[in-house]
Image: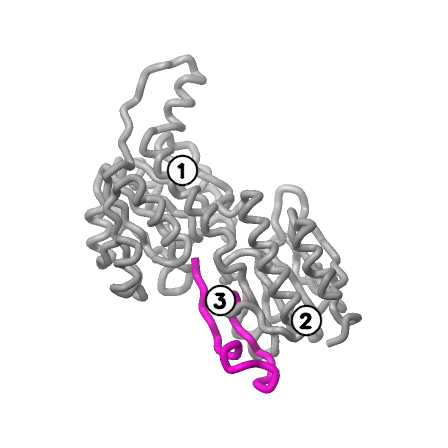
Amino acid sequence: MTATDRNVLVTLRFFDNESMAILRDAGCTVTIHEPPPGANDGAFSPAELKEMLAGKQGWIVGHAWVTREVLESAPQLAVVARRGVGYERVDAVAAKELGKVVTIAAGGNAPSVADQAIGLMIGIGRRFREQHERMAAGDWTILVGTELYRSTVGLIGFGRIARQLARRLKGFETEILAYSPRLDAATAAEYGVRPVDLPSLLRESDYVSVHAPLNASTRHLVDPQALSSMKKTAILVNTSRGGLVDETALLAALRAGAIAGAALDVFEGEIDPAMRAVAQELLKLPNFIGQPHSGASTSEALGRSNVLAARSIAAVLTGTPPVADCVIVDGRAPASVSEHQGRETTCHS
């Protein structure tokens, strides 16, 4: 691929100068189409994406739907790089069949999301929202909260973010339980966590933090039965993906006092507009904190993720191997791909 064939589309806000320089140093011409105010690039229609991708060989994407239809419309597109780690909006099967490379920004946002999870645990446990709202109304009554210190925290999933979180939780002298089908004894020992099955984790934990990928087998992993098995004093946190928690069941559980509180940074309503009404009801509750999928939105995390995405684009377009941990699928002809890079890699938060 010649330098004249290195046209890159960026459908993001906050794409920084360092990352732009990486692309330009690789001979890339960069076009930025920022999403509409108040929206991410998931707001772009397939028709708009097709028009933007005309003549582009690389695409740095946030939350846009990377469908077979869109990919087929851009035969010259060689690489799609997500500024993030989840890729449920990317048709990876189609990308591979069409000979394209898909990458993620592996590890770029892990510290930021782990920090946020700690903040949400403390915020709900110490009843920050309730105290603030009461004081704003003139009531300075002190409410009694609960400590994260020396509590039992259960982590559902044990990828990059959960591992960062486990390291932070050690400072609070917590007992950490972890449920993940892929968690081996050596990794559990390294991070000081106790592997358990999901029912045990839900039953024993004071705080439950969700860090699993969203797929057909994990949708509504935290369902009415799971919520009913938790302690009444327990707190639920989800910073991974909307859809892992059955929010209708969560609303009922919080209203009934089945659990003490919850905090979500991700909602089913992000994808399903019909679920926005449930989110709005959750946001009215005093023992609930909501965030608009902002866990990765720190200047530091965005900078790291931008750089990882830019390096992946530059590598593929200049014919050098991208970082293996960032590669989700590589559909290029075997002759152009090393044995190490040619395998399909799965990377989750």
Magenta-drawn segment: 325-349
Tell me whether the residue at label 1 lies in contact with that at label 3, contact meaning CB atoms closer than 8 angstroms.
no
Above or below residue 260? Residue 27 is: below
Q: Which residue is mark 1?
A: 119
Please report the residue visible at 26 percent of the width from the left and 41 percent of the height from the top. Answer: 173
Residue 326 x %, y %: 52, 65
Residue 312 is covered by the magenta coloring: no
Instruction: Give the amino acid at mark 3.
Output: Asp
Q: What residue occupies the far bottom of the structure in this picture?
A: 335
Residue 184 x %, y %: 28, 65
Q: Nearer the viewer, residue 323 or 4?
A: 323
Q: CA distance from mark 2 to mark 1?
A: 40 Å
| Residue 195 placement: quadrant | bottom left
How packed mark 3 is, by other alpha carbons closer than 10 Å (few <14, some 14-19, many 20 or more), is some
Q: Mark 2 or 1 closer to N-term?
A: 1
Q: Which residue is mark 2?
A: 317
> Quarter of the image containing the C terminus?
bottom left
Q: Which residue is mark 3?
A: 325
**Can the viewer see residue 256?**
no
Instruction: Give the amino acid at mark 1.
Output: Gly
Q: CA distance from mark 1 to mark 3?
A: 28 Å
Nearest to viewer (mark 2 / mark 1):
2
